[in-house]
Image (tube, coloured by chain):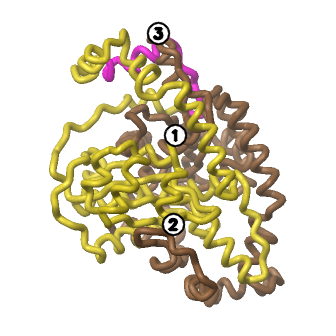
Chain colours: A brown, B yellow
Amino acid sequence: MDSIKNRRTIRKYTEQDIPSTLLDSLLDEAFRASTMGNMQLYSVVVTRDIEMKNKLAPAHFNQPMVTSAPVVLTFCADFNRFSLWCRQRKAEPGYNNFISFLNAATDALLVTQNFCTLAEEEGLGICYLGTTIYDPEQIIRILELPELVVPVATITVGYPDEHPAQPDRLPLRGIVHEETYKNYTPEMIDDIYAYKESLPENRHFVEINHTETLAQIFTDIRYKKSDNESMSENLLKVIRKQGF
Amino acid sequence: MDSIKNRRTIRKYTEQDIPSTLLDSLLDEAFRASTMGNMQLYSVVVTRDIEMKNKLAPAHFNQPMVTSAPVVLTFCADFNRFSLWCRQRKAEPGYNNFISFLNAATDALLVTQNFCTLAEEEGLGICYLGTTIYDPEQIIRILELPELVVPVATITVGYPDEHPAQPDRLPLRGIVHEETYKNYTPEMIDDIYAYKESLPENRHFVEINHTETLAQIFTDIRYKKSDNESMSENLLKVIRKQGF
């Protein structure tokens, strides 16, 4: 599929809006993804209002796509709707636990990826914001998410106003294992990461960040242990606070 | 996209094998999905060997697709490869924590859904096995997954040998929220679930299970609180044991 093979993340969008009918039909198709026991354990909050985008932006470290995209979608793991239905039908729901969170998050993420594929096939561009689970409490408050609802993915969507180079990917042999997982030898690691490390943009990246290696940019600047630890503690707290 | 709009889970497959070249090219395209910081925090284990399928089957409650499909794919959250690279490049990885597990699981699930779309577009049929996180320790042992690798999704793949009816989905208005989450009133719950409850197969399901409502089949038979609680405890233990 060319739309998947040639895809790239789009962070700049034209002024053109996305009609509600188009957005609805893309979402409706996306909901065809596999879902645990056909429970559809997700909800999607659509943000078009600029004031709401301004409120959401800090939760996403003020990445400019949040306010410049015509549409921001927050995909949530949702056991609230299903539990309400159970109670209304003389059934006692037992989904206030960790595996139910992960089941619902899985459902929501499969739908998120399905939506991205459909949107890109339609000529739209998307950006996936990994920041959603960094400080989910802000998002929960702004979008008024009740118990048993946790945001797990945010997508900005619009018509592309840029055509960036396609980023590199690791070679297939570095990711796929036959029958059992063959742990990586130092030689394999050198081989798998050689192309990434050789790229002029990555060499430049190392230069301007004054690190010795590309890996140090990840460990010392972008995804630091201390940040990961405090975010982990916070995330587990929020998941519990939301009733899981 | 018709292949998404008309999709259904396929549990019966013909004898026809899937050529390695086709499988590799589908996986390679699937890896174009968005990934956190372009770290590609996933691995895929391909199972073709019948003995390996027989070993995996109990971890999936002996669902027959595991042994009858030509290919079984286990998608894993993987911070092992990236951490090995860091250490080999004088960088100290800080990914032995919960948020790193969820970041890697997210990466893996986006790739899983991308693979499913590509496989179905190619005429293959897939079945998503939600059982992967029920007893991951068995899968970890059988596939020899090292620390910082946790299986999060399993897909059986093959050429379809059935054409089942397409399952129902909830109406869009039951899932999509504009600007803020509007919690469901009892009337909305009745409306959203009316179609599902009216289906002859679901009424039959209630009859043969001797329950009063459809919801009770979920809470009392299929996804019970006590099972969810013991699986939650086990899953958190396994995630920690794998080093996250």
**Which residue corresponds to the image point at 35% horizontal and 17% vertical from the top-left?**
B194
Residue at the spot of label 3:
A90
Residue at the spot of label 1:
A103
Q: CA distance from mark 1 to mark 2?
A: 20 Å
> Mark 1, chain letter?
A
Label 2 Cα neighbours within 10 Å, binned few <14 / some 14-19 / many ≥20: many
Residue B52: name its quadrant. Answer: bottom left
Image coordinates of residue A242 in percent, x first then y, are 68, 31
> Looking at the picture, do discs 3 and 2 lie on one chain?
no
Q: CA distance from mark 1 to mark 3?
A: 23 Å
Q: CA distance from mark 3 to mark 2?
A: 43 Å
Q: Is residue A165 at least partly visible in the picture?
A: no
Q: Please, what secondary structure does the residue beneath circle 3 have?
A: loop
> Looking at the picture, do discs 1 and 3 lie on one chain?
yes
For the residues labelled 1 and 3, say whether their Cβ atoms are less than 8 Å apart: no
Query: Compared to B228, does B138 lie above or below?
Result: below
> Which residue is at the front of the view, B124 or B52?
B52
> Mark 2, chain letter?
B
